[in-house]
Image (cartoon, rainbow, N blue to C red):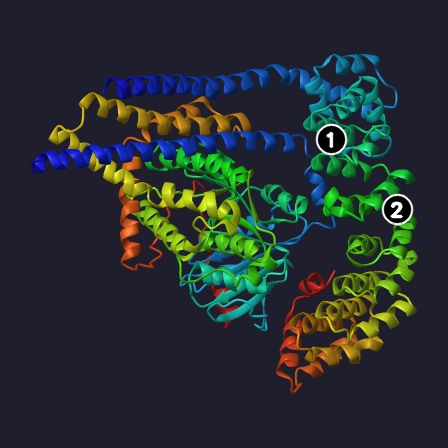
Amino acid sequence: MSAYEVAAWVLVKLEWAILAYFLLVNGWYFILLASAGLEMRRHALLSRGQARWKMLGSRVVPGISMLAPAYNEAATIGESVRALLALYYPNLEVVVVNDGSRDETMAVLIDQFDLAPIHPIFPRRVSSAAVVALYRSRTHPNLVVIDKQNGGKADALNAGLNLATGDLVCAIDADTLIEPDALIRMVRPFIDDDRVIAAGGTIRIANASKVESGRIVETRVPRRALPGFQVVEYLRAFLFGRLGWNRLGGNLIISGAFGLFRRDLMLAAGGYLHETVGEDMELVLRLRRTGYERGGAHRVDFIPDPVAWTEAPSSLRVLARQRDRWQRGLSDVLWRHRGLLFNPKYGRMGTIVYPYFLVNELFAPVVEAVGFVGVILGLLLGAINWPFAILFFLTAYGLGALLTLTALVLEEMNFHRYHTFGDRVMLVVWALLENLGYRQLTVVWRLKGMWNYVRGSRQWGKMDRTGFTTVRKTPPADATDAGKKARA
Amino acid sequence: MTGPIRLLHLALLVIGIGAAAALFVIFGHAARAAWRERRSRPVLERGRIALAAVGVNPRVDRSDIGLLRALPRRLQVRLFVELMPSMAGTQRQRMAALAHEIGLAGAAEGMCYSRKWWRRLRGVRLLTAVGGGEGVVPDLLFDRHPAVRAEAAEWAGQHPRPEIVERLIKLLETPEAVGSWVLRDSLLRIGIPCIPALAAYLETHSGAQAEPALEVAAGLADPRFSAAAVRLCGDPEPSVRARAAALAGAIGGDALVRRLETLLVDLDEAVRAAAAASLGRLGHWPAATELARMLRDPAWIVRSQSALAMRRLGSPGHLLLRRALDDPDRFAADIARQVLDMPETTAERDQWR
C-alpha cells in the first residue's frame, strides 16, 4: 500500500466518521426542535389570557433583587438604573455595583439618585473584593449602590449578593435593556413550582432597534451583516436550543445578561466563582449538581417571553474576543464538572445534557474543522467523489438553514416581534447567508478559544460597544462635581 | 456511490420542501395577522364604544347589545378582557350582565366542562375576567391539571362566598396543590370575609400547615387572630414562630407584646429578628433597652432588625442608638452607625415584614 493509498483510506474513513457525527448532531437538533415546538405550544396555552397585572397588586410576591454590575458606564448608568427602577414588579430592589470604575459612574449615580453614604458594613456571606463605600438613595428607597474595588463581573455580582435581600436574585449586565413586564413573566415558574432553582429568559439583539429612556421602542433587524447574523443566531439558540431542553433534562446555561436565581441557594453554593470566565454557566451547573447531591430542588426553566435586549458586537475583532471567551468558559466549566459525564446520580443532566454539551457544543468546532480540511484534502487527492461532496455540502447547508428558518417560524407564530415585511425578509436573508462564511468564522474563533484555554488564558477580553440607537447624555459637569463632593 | 447520492438527493428534496413550508408560514402568518388586524380594527373600535356605553349608561341601548352580540367570539373575548380589569362596582356588574346576555359567560362555562385542560383553563380565565361561573368553577379547585386549579383559586379570590372561602382555606393544608402564592394572594384579596374561617383554621393547625395561613393573617391584621398568634409563637418550628411573631406585630395587644418579649431570647435568629421588628412596628418603647442589648447579638439579621426597630421607636430608640455608637462591642456600634445613617424611607423599607 502506497502512502497515497493510506492517506486516501484514512480520509475516506474520517469522512465516514464525520458523516456519522453530522447525523448524530443534526438528529439531536431535530429532537430539540420537536421538544421546543411542544414546549412553545404548552407555554402559549398556559400564558394566553393570563392576567399578569394581578401580580402587581399582590402583597405576597417573592422579593427580587436586581444585581447590576457597572464598570465605566458613566454615559448610560443613569438611564439604565432608572429603567430598572421602573420595571413592573411590586417587590423590587435594585443593587448597583460600581466595580471600581475609572470614569464618573459613581459621581453620576450619587447625583442622579440623591445617594446618602451609609456605614459600609454588611454580612460577608460570599467573597468579593473590598467594598469602598455603601449608599442608599433618599429618593428611591429600593436602590442600593455598592462602590467597590475592581474585581470583575463575578466579583461584583458576589458583592451585590451579599447586600441583596430579595428571595430571588436577578443577575444582569449593566447594558442589558429589560422589558418592563419581564420580571412578572420570569417569576412565574418560581411561584408555580417550589422545585425551580433558576430561570432564564430570551436575550435579543438590540442593534438597529430604537431605544428611548432605557426601553426598546421600535424593533428592527440590523441591515449590517455581523449583527444580522447574530440576531438569527440568538433566535435559534434561545427559541429552540434552550426551550427544547426544558423537556429533555433542563438547561445548563442561563445567560449572564438576564437570569433569575433563588438567593438562598446561591448563597449556600458560595455565589459566583471568580476563577472562570464562564461564571454564569458554572453557577447553574453547581446549583443543579448540589440539588441532585442533596436530594433537593434542581430544576432550571427557560421561559421564552421575558425578554432582555443587548447590544451585539458589530466588529469582527470584538466578536472574535467574545466567542473566544465563551468557548474558554464552556471548556473550563465542562472540565470542572467532568464528574457529571454519564453519571446516573445526576439523572438526565449527567446522562443526556452534559454529554450533549460535550459533543455538540464543545467539540463541534474541532469536528467541523477536521471535516472541512478532510473534504478539501480528499477532493485534492481524488479520494472523495466530487458529486457526493457537493451534495453533502448542500445538505449540511440546507439543514442548518432549515433549523434557523424553523426558529424564525417559532418567533413569528408566537412573538411576532418584527413587524415590517422588510424586517422579515432581512431575517430570512441572514438565516440563509449565515452558514456561508460566518459560521466558519465562528469555528475558527471557537478553536482559538479552546487553544487559549489549554494555554491557560483567563482573560475576559475588552468588549467595545458602539451604543444603542438612542440619544446618549453625557453627565453634566456640575453633576460630576457634586458627586465628587459627596464622595469626599 | 449511487446509494448515498440518492439518499442525499432525497434529503435535499425534504429540506427544500421544509424550507419552502417555513417561508410560507413566516410570510403567510404575518400577512394573515396583518389582514385580520386591519379587518377587525373598525369593528373592535365600534365594539369598544358600545361596551363603554353599556358600562357607563344605566339605560342599555339594544343596538349596542346587538352589535356586541354580532361580533365574532374572539373579538368579544378581546374586548371584555381588555376593558373589565378597569371596571369596578356597578359598571362591572353591568358589564358582567352583558357578558351573560350575549352568551360569552355561557360559552366560558361550557369550556370549563371540556376534556382538554387548556380549554378549561381558558374558560376559568374568561370567567375571572367577565364574572359568573359560580356553578362550575368551585369544582375546578380540585381539577387534575395544576394550572386549572391555580386559575380557579384566582377566580375564588373574587367570589368570597362562605363555601368557596371554606374550600380555599381547606387547601391551605396542601398549598402545593394550587401553588402557595395563588392561595395566599386569593385569601388576601378576599380580605375580611375570610377572617372567621382563617382564625378557626389557625386555632387547629400548626407547623408547616399554619405558615401560609399566618402570612395571610399578618396581612389582614385582625384581633381575631390573637389567640392563634399567642399559641403559634410557641410552635416547635422556628419558621412558624417567626411568622407568628410577625402576626403579633401586626395585631398588637398586651398578651402578644408579652409573648414577643419572650421571643427576643429565642434560640433561632429569625425568630429573634422577627420579634424585634414586631416590637418596633408596635412602637413598644419599653422594649427599647432590651432591643439595645440585642445590638450585640451574634446574628447580623437580629442586630440589623433590632437597630431598625429602635429607630422606629422614636426618641427613646434614637437616644439608645446614639449611645450604642460608643458601645465597646464593635458590631453593636457599627450597626447603630449604619441605621442612623440611613435615609428615612430606606429604614422604613428594610423593616422585617
Q: What mark, if any, has residue B194 been given in the picture?
A: 2
Q: State the residue at coordinates (74%, 12%).
A: B70
A118 relative to B148 in the view: left or right: left
Residue B125's label in the rendered image is 1
Where, by quadrant of the figure, is residue B245 drawn?
A: bottom right
Q: Find residue A133 and report its horizontal and vertical position in percent.
A: 52, 70
Q: Secondary structure at mark 2?
A: helix
In which quadrant of the rendered image does the N terminus of chain B lie?
top left
Residue sitting at 68 percent across and 38 percent down?
Answer: A52
Give whichever of A278, A374 is nearer the camera.
Answer: A374
The chain letter under disc 2 is: B
- Which mark sits nearer the N-terminus, 1 or 2? 1
Q: Amino acid under label 1?
A: Arg
- Tell me the chain of label 1: B
Local packing at callout 2 (Cα closer than 10 Å; few below 14, some 14-19, many 20+) is many
Gap in Å between the C-alphas at discs 1 and 2?
A: 23 Å
